[in-house]
Image (cartoon, grey):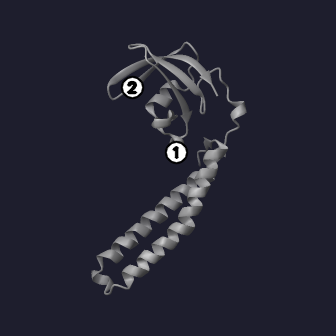
Amino acid sequence: MAQFQYYTAEAVEKLKTELHSLKFQGRQDMAKQIAEARDKGDLSENAEYDAAKDAQGLLELKISKLEQVVANARVLDESTIDISKVSIYSIVQIKNTKNGMIVTYTIVSEEEADLKTGKISASSPFGKGLLGKQVGDLAQITAPAGTLEFEIMSISR
């Protein structure tokens, strides 16, 4: 049974664009590489041809996985997000109870996660530790440095 993943409309469009690019431009480029390698002589001793065929296999695997992601992608209506508790696409402000440092994260799908822009995956240890929490709750999150405790300061969308 397929498990649906929720994305913003923008993220779904980005996934579809990447898939289209891989299927058309990626496959064309790969065919050219294989043809060029094939033209270099005996295929039984042609390492460039073998490498191109391996790369083609990896491209097809990536396309297959991305097709599955797109097929199971569902657009989340951001206006329906319940901001009484942390959920996917919540913007949550948390305070480290040890050092008082306050940070803000947006909880997103795994494919959209980008720590540099403050987007963390709902399936990451941080995301899992925050999901379902309400303002004022304490979240204990196991990190490589040990267990960290954060207070939920605010939740928005």
Residue, x 57% and y 55% (percent of image)? Answer: 68
Q: Residue 111 — which label? A: 1
- Image quadrant containing the C terminus: top right
Q: Earlier in the sequence, mark 1 or mark 2?
A: 1
- Secondary structure beneath label 2: strand
Label 2 crowding class (10 Å Cα cut-off): few <14, some 14-19, many 20+?
few
Residue at label 2?
142
Label 1 crowding class (10 Å Cα cut-off): few <14, some 14-19, many 20+?
few
Residue, x 48% and y 25% (percent of image)? Answer: 129
- Secondary structure beneath label 1: helix
The image quadrant of residue 19 is bottom right
Dot 2 amino acid type: Thr
Q: Nearer the viewer, residue 144 or 156?
A: 156
Q: Could you tell me residue 17's position as x and y percent? A: 60, 57
> Relative to 46, is 62 above or below?
above
Relative to residue 96, is residue 8 drawn left or right?
right
Q: Could you tell me residue 111's position as x and y percent? A: 52, 45
> Relative to 14, is 8 above or below?
above
Q: Could you tell me residue 71's position as x and y percent? A: 62, 53
Residue, x 53% and y 63% (percent of image)? Answer: 22
Q: Could you tell me residue 137's position as x and y percent? A: 53, 14
Dot 1 amino acid type: Glu
